[in-house]
Image: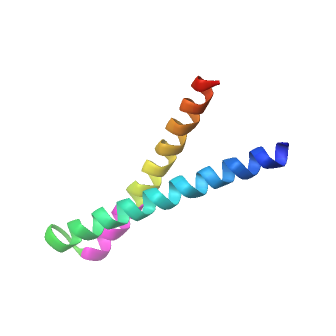
Amino acid sequence: MSDLKIDKNFERWLECMARGILVGGSLGAIAGWFFMDFQRALLLGMLIGCLAGVTMKNVKDSKDSDSK
C-alpha cells in the first residue's frame, strides 16, 4: 500500500511539473516573438512554469486532504 502511495505522489509531481514547464515555455516563446530575446524568454517561461507546477501540486494535495 505504501508503494502505491509513493507511485501516485511521483506521478502527480511528474504531471504537474510537465504541465507547468510546457505551458510556461509556450508563454515564454510567445513573449520571445514579441517582446524580448527568444532564448531568454523561453528559459524564464520554463522556470516560472516549474514554480507554477509546484503550486499546482500543492493545491491538488490540499484539495485531496480537505475532501478526506
At 22% across and 74% down in the image, what residue appears? 37
13 relative position to 3: left or right? left
7 relative position to 24: left or right? right
In this picture, is 37 found above or below 3? below
Q: Nearer the viewer, residue 36 or 62?
A: 62
The prevailing secondary structure element of the residues shown in magenta is helix
Q: Quadrant of the N terminus?
A: top right
At 50% across and 61% down in the image, what residue appears? 18
At 47% across and 42% down in the image, what residue appears? 55
Q: Nearer the viewer, residue 12 or 52?
A: 12
Coordinates of residue 48 in the picture (x, y in percent): 39, 55
Q: Quadrant of the C terminus?
A: top right
Q: Is residue 12 magenta?
A: no
At 60% across and 50% down in the image, what residue appears? 12
Coordinates of residue 13 in the picture (x, y in percent): 60, 52
Q: Give the magenta-colored segment's residue range.
A: 38-46
Residue furthest to the left:
34
Coordinates of residue 43 in the picture (x, y in percent): 37, 68
Coordinates of residue 51 in the picture (x, y in percent): 45, 50
55 relative position to 38: left or right? right
